Image (spheres, rainbow, N blue to C red):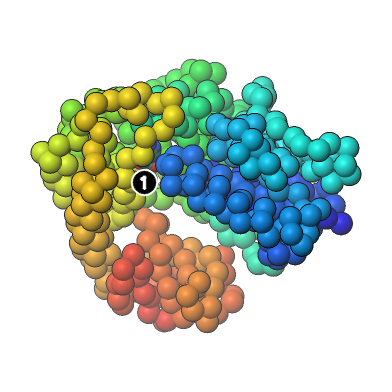
Amino acid sequence: MPSVYIKTYGCQMNERDSEAVAAQLLARGYVLAKSEQTADVILLNTCSVRDFAEQKAIGKMTNLAVETRRHRPHVVLGFMGCMAQSRGQGLIDQLPDVDLVLGTQKFHRTAEHLDDLLAGRKDKVVDVAEEAGSQGAIREHLLAGSGRKSVSAFVSIMQGCNQHCTFCIVPFTRGEERSRTIPDIVTECRELVAQGVREITLLGQIVTSFGKRDLPTVEGRSPFVQLLDAVHEIEGLQRLRFTSPHPKGYGDDLVEAYARLPKLVESAHIPVQSGSDRILKLMHRGYTRERFLEIIGKLRQVQPGMGLCTDIIVGFPGETEADFEETLSLVRAARFDQAYIFKYSPRKDTPAADLPDQVPQAVKEERNQRLLELINQMAAEQFGACVGQVEEILVEGPSKKNPVRLTGRTRSNKIVVFEGSDRHLGQVIKLRIVRAGSFTLYGDPAIINLD
Ligand code: 5AD
């Protein structure tokens, strides 16, 4: 039985793809290796969003090639995912030890290609062609046999993005928007809940555009909101989340869904990217600063405890000090719980890479630092405000830092660590928050109430 080790770079969509590939390989008789040192097959699932992510995976593969070719020449080495899609054969030209390059529409073919490579039927495989219907192929989960009860699961609802933000490589790595059907997604969610899953996160590159091409708006509800309604009905499901949305998808139907659907927890990751209208326009984001703040205001009106997280790019071409200050002031106004900051990285074939006035690296670093300080300060305020409050927590498992403690999340997506016991796993409990650390809350061990 060949053993496989998968290392994942990048976003939750990549994590989910790796999980589906692992489950597929297990079903085909492969086993999962504990480490890359003992694996017969090593796959790197890659990210292309910034050059740094690509260089990390290439560096890793270079090291793997040196190590394995010396002592274990039979090991199959593969790239899959976004960088595999965007670079294709070029990866083997650059690193001739690589045996497999598998694109983002071909995850379901992994076992077939590995069988061929391991049996010596093929020497190299590059498979990055488009495949109709591939958005419905990421459906296997690794719930059974993972050694612990899976409380939370991710479900891929669509692939690709047509927004064409000028900085973004995703339309080239994930292709055109293609959505699964609502019944297909609901079936998968229902099976997960039957296996003990309590929380589902719907995934896609631009989930708010779900079904736009295939389904009509019904009674003012977009196809995405129709999907939320359908998944919400599943009995036994306790929490529903989604990522990533686009701000333009926050019509009143979605805002109202937060008021209407109790399982749709009061949390949103809404990427703003910049606080300057001039830069938002150059990015082709399709909204203004004012509109973004209006959406947040509406969300907080229906759910005052709304937890908000965002992505921000610093140093986009042409970003002046004044533009950057607009971003700082937007962050202050929005009171995010958390934000991921990205230094702009020019990507091949994207319009922004050719814009004039590229920002020097030192300026990007400096803006990154200033923004980080502000985000940390905002987060400390937001997390600090939870101290003394009673929060509803879904208990996920042992805490990473201290496995004697348990960890879970509040409805607003804040991590809570507390002393509990195994019987709390998978339960929704109420705890009083006694302390706030950096991006973590600590709960009183006296559990107030089990659901
Ligand atoms: N440079 C820097 N950050 C980027 N992102 C996307 N493309 C780029 C790029 N070229 C960031 C955006 C997006 C997140 C996933 O990655 O903020 O929301």
Residue under the point 81% across and 49% down: 27
Residue at coordinates 21% horizontally, 52% vertically from top-left?
Answer: 366
Where residue 17 sits in the image (x, y, percent)?
Answer: 62, 44
Read off the residue under disc 1. 268
Taking depth in this image into account, of 240 and 335 the one nearest to the observer is 335
12 or 99: nearer the eye? 99
Left or right: 427 with respect to 119?
Answer: left
Residue 72 seen: yes
Residue 97 in the image: above or below residue 387: above
Can residue 182 be seen by looking at this rendering? no
Q: Nearer the viewer, residue 371 or 426?
A: 371
Q: Position of residue 305 (x, y in %)?
A: 29, 54
Q: Quadrant of ligand 1?
A: top left
Amino acid type at image mark 1: Ala
Location of residue 146 by image quarter:
bottom right
Taking depth in this image into account, of 119 and 45 the one nearest to the observer is: 119
- Mark 1: few, some, or many residues within 10 Å (few <14, many ≥20)? many
* Quarter of the image where the N terminus is located: bottom right
Vertical order, 275 against 176 (above or below): below
Residue found at the far left of this picture: 322
Q: Residue at x 60, y 51 (%)?
A: 62
User: Horizontally, is 39 left or right of 372 in the view?
Assistant: right
Q: Secondary structure at mark 1?
A: strand
Q: Residue 195: x percent and y percent?
A: 68, 55
Residue drawn at 59 percent across, 75 percent down: 423
Q: How many marks?
A: 1
